[in-house]
Image: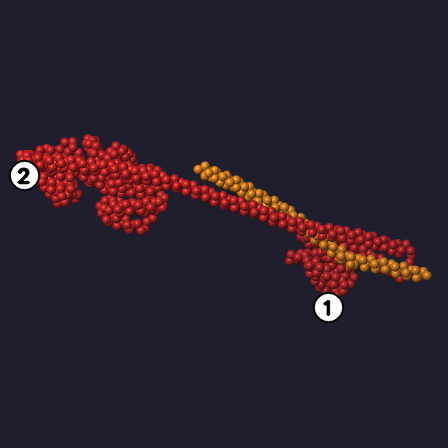
Amino acid sequence: MKKLLCALVLIFSNYSHSQSTQKIIDSLKTLLNSQKELPLVNTLTELAWEYENRNIDSALFYSKQSLNISKKIKSDEAFAASYNSLASCFDALGKLDSAIYYHQKSLDLKLKLNNKIGAANSYNNLGIVYDLSGDFDVSLQNYFKALNIFESENVPFDKVPMVLGNIGIVYKKEKEFGKALEYYNRALEIYQANNYNFGEVVTKGNIGAILIHLKQFEKAIKYCSEAQEAYAKLGYNRYVPYMLSNIAIAKDSLKRYNEAEKDLERVISLFQKEQNYYELVHNKLSFAHNLHKQQKLTQAFLNANDALQIAKNKGFKEWEVKAYKVLAHIEKSKQNYKAYATYFEMYAQKKDSLFEEKKTKTVFELETKYKTAKKEKEILAQRAQIAEKELNINRKNMQLLGLGVLAIVLSVFGYLVYKQQKLKNKQLQKENQLKEALSKIETQNKLQDQRLRISRDLHDNIGAQLTFIISSIENLQYGFKISNTNLTNKLTGISSFTKDTINELRDTIWAMNKNEISLTDLQIRISNFIDKAHVSSQGIHFNFLVAEELKNNTVFTSVQGMNIYRIIQEAINNAIKYANASSVNVEISEKNNKLLFEVFDNGTGFNLEEVEAGNGLNNMKKRATDVGASITIQSNKNSGTKIAVTL
Amino acid sequence: MCFNIIFEVIIGLLLLVLSIAIIITIKRIFVFNENAKKRNQVLAFKVSLAKKENAQLQQKTVLVNAINTTLYPRFFSIIEQILSLQKNIFDESL
């Protein structure tokens, strides 16, 4: 009876969502297909939980599956849930050491994650397992830790009374009935405050059982009656006979034998109906005991004998021993001492046998425990070895990784050195090319410079000789009065030819002395030429115009400058010599981003188709072409001539 | 164990040294590139100046060639005319 009540409380403590288990299992299985990672682990642990009271193998399967997924996703939260689920399975299988091991691992992870409520649940679970293993002190320590956390955190209301109830169970086992009652009462207050009927009725049943131990039978009857009614009202009819049984015990103790007899009859019929033979035998013996007290010896004997037969059939050896004892007492009351002796002998024999069996069982259990501990020790040693090997492998991997990184860094370094060398070579090559080109150009320049210097010396020499010739001829002309006209003409011709030559030489020397010829230089030169022309041709009016915006920026190469000057010179000379013009205009301007040099006169002009181009016109065209300029000559009879050069 | 530690220390040191060497090399490459760029610019400038001078000298050479083609024949023509005049003077004086 007591064991069943404890079990009832334990079941109750994990009962919050067990109304329609199959429906829940089906919906959880449907969820499995659509989930991944942590939600999947949670669903698997839920499934394991649902299966725990139905099919422990399935529960263990789902727990292991959740652990496998946790290993894949490497989440501490998932590991904690999986370990908790595994521990519950081992708990249900009675493998308490494994249950403790996994609960502890789950607890450590929850503490690491600072999951206080989860840790409190683990403490509570550890408390249950230690309670089952008989280590009540450790069990209480864990329960109190769980209680502290639940009381300080915001948790569902049923958590605190659940732990209080568990503490009550441990105190009851330690026969500390006063303390057990205190904790049950605290739990009851919370359930009542929250109108949680199921919790209230279970706790009342527990209190009733405790009150029997405390010999407060009236109170016990009250609590058990309330619990009995509530169980019936809530539809938990299977628990009703337990309450009735407690009520009967209390009444029997109060010597209210008739009432107890009626209750026991009802209890027996209910257990019979439920085919709960263990409780049936127990209550039949209580009933026999009750009847014995009322001196209803025949009825007492029949019930005790009935209980004995059922106990024999079902193998309830404890009840078999007790049945012999009750039968012996009944026979003694009947003064049938032979039968009394026989039953008493059977009682003693069975008791010894039971004791032996219990002893053997204890020894066997101890041996199993020893073997389990030994195996667990071996497993731990193996785990340590595996961990060490894993550490070594990790170290080797790290070293390999280090070597790999070193190789990469070395390759990068090698590549950089190679690139540096390549850059140096490339730069050297480029520098050499540039230096070579420079030296080649400089050599050419030196050579050309030397040639030009020689030419310049030669020109200076020739210029000096020509000047001497002119001077000598002019001395001859003006120093001696030469009457010979032929001679005078010849002297004049030579002088004029020499002057033209020296002028041409001077023009070239002017151009050679400049690296670049600016428009201003050209303008001055043309202006000088026009002045001289004006002196020699008094009747002609000369105009020279340069557009203002051109003066500063425009520069020419010496060849360009020289050729343009020569074209203008030739055009003016032609106008003076052949056009019979009264006005000659020279204009320099800009047109369409090009320079335009124009020389035009108001002379007689000529027909371009009729006049064969002489050396002068051809020279002009050639010079223009040499400097990349275009030349146009416009002329008609009696309408002047216009020569335009565009550069 | 001892070997492992020595091995790991050596790897670590080598990595450190190589990392420093890489940084120094990258810096050197950078500095070298900068200097090379400057040197190339200076040389290119010199070459462009020399080319410009060369172009000017070529222009002058063109001018010299042009004047030479007219100057020398004219000079010799003047000499010839003077000699001819001299001959006439002698002939007439005789």
Q: Which residue is mark 1?
A: A609
Could you tell me residue A309's position as x and y percent? Answer: 11, 42
Closer to the eye: label 1 or 2: 2
Secondary structure, mark 2, is helix
Query: Which residue appears at 18% of the width and 36% of the height?
Result: A356
Quarter where residue A158 is shown:
top left
Q: Residue at x 26, y 47 (%)?
A: A58
Please indicate whether residue A220 sits to the left or right of residue A335 in the image.
right
The quadrant of the picture occupied by the N terminus of chain A is top left
- Percent position (x, y) of residue A616? 76, 62
Please indicate, yes or no, whether residue A111 appears anywhere in the rendered image: yes
| Marks 1 and 2 close (CB-CB < 8 Å) | no
In the rendered image, the vertical position of residue A632 relative to residue A302, given as above or below: below
- Chain for mark 2? A
Residue B35 - label: none
Label 1 to label 2: alpha-carbon separation: 171 Å
Q: Which residue is mark 2?
A: A298
Chain A in the picture: what colour?
A: red
Q: Which chain is orange?
A: B
Q: Amino acid at mark 1?
A: Glu
Q: Which one is nearer the viewer's eye here, A571 or A302?
A: A302
> Is residue A476 shown left or right of residue A268?
right
Residue A394: where, in percent of width, then height? 41, 42
* Residue type marked 2: Thr
Q: Label 1 marks which chain's residue?
A: A
- Which corner quadrant holds the C terminus of chain A? bottom right
Q: Nearer the viewer, residue B9 or A224?
A: B9
Looking at marks 1 and 2 on the same chain, the residue that comes earlier in the sequence is marked by 2
